[in-house]
Amino acid sequence: MRKLLLAFLLAATCLAPLMAGPYDGGPSLVVLDPGHGGEDPGAVTGDVLEKDLALAFSLKIAEALEERGVPVRLTRSDDSTLTLQERCDNANSSELPAGGYPILLSIHMNSAGNSTASGFEVYTRLPGHDQQMLDEHASDSLALTYASYDNEELNEACFSCSEDLAGRLCQAFARRFPSIRMRGVKSSDLWVLNASWMPAVLIEVGFMSNPDELERLCDPAFQEDFADLVADVVISLY
């Protein structure tokens, strides 16, 4: 009876990682992707460039995450020009610390022809837009971690995790900044979401075309508050 019990416990231990799912246990790496950069300024309002704001926000988020002990990788840490695929390859090739999974946060500012447009929104990839996970750009540690899952399982779990992350970000933002319009979670056919095999969201922090929001986006105090919010959301995934 004792041998049978030990055998059962050993089998349960071996199967536990599979039963838990590929994106359980919390992020062990956050890849931050500051939108645009270099020759691509992104949205432009007066002398304010989206690429500069995206980098400023991303650097503050990186600092807030590192203060909480979460490893971070940036697709760019200066005013570099990167193609959309290079950003994804950078994320997919990340070496993954043990004990968790990677997520990607792409940071952007919004803009519209109507200067009254406002608010915060988060994008995930379109439902059912499956991709070939763990391609040739995947690092050895990532490939080893997820070798036991098939492509369908990874896609399904990746989409579910991305939706959960996007929802948590919107809920946290609405609590922290109740006076700012909440535009919610949306899905779109965006390259950086489609070609990054890990759970990924694209965050539109606010509208540069709205004078009030532009002033807030340029405020270092707001940038720090937002960075703390994002870091707290990441911690909540554990």
Image (tube, helix red, strand yellow):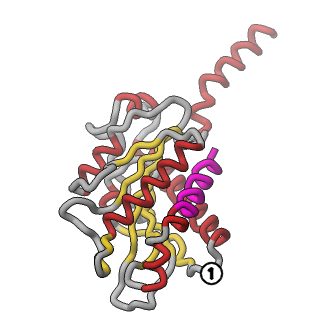
Give the quarter of the image for residue 53: bottom left
SS at badge 1? loop
Residue that badge 1 annotates: 179
* 228 displayed left or right of 36: right
Judge whether 64 appears above or below 36 on screen.
Answer: above
* Residue density around tag 1, few if under 14, some if 14–19, many if 20 or more, within 10 Å: few
Residue 228 highlighted magenta (yes or no): yes
Residue 99 position in % (x across, y down): 55, 32
Q: Residue 54's quadrant in the figure?
A: bottom left
Q: Which residue sits at x=58%, y=68%?
A: 170
- Residue lying at the far right of the rendered structure: 1
What's the residue type where badge 1 is placed? Ser
Q: Tell me which corner region of the image, top left, top right, bottom left or bottom right, holds residue 69.
A: top right
Determine whether, in the image, residue 49 is placed left or right of residue 98: left
Residue 127 visible (yes or no): no
Q: Position of residue 118 (x, y in %)?
A: 48, 83
Q: In this view, does 104 lie above or below 179?
A: above
Q: Is residue 7 above or below residue 181?
A: above
Magenta region, residue range: 224-238
Image coords of residue 16 (percent x, y) = 63, 30
Q: Magenta span has 65?
A: no
Residue at 59% across / 43% down in the picture?
68
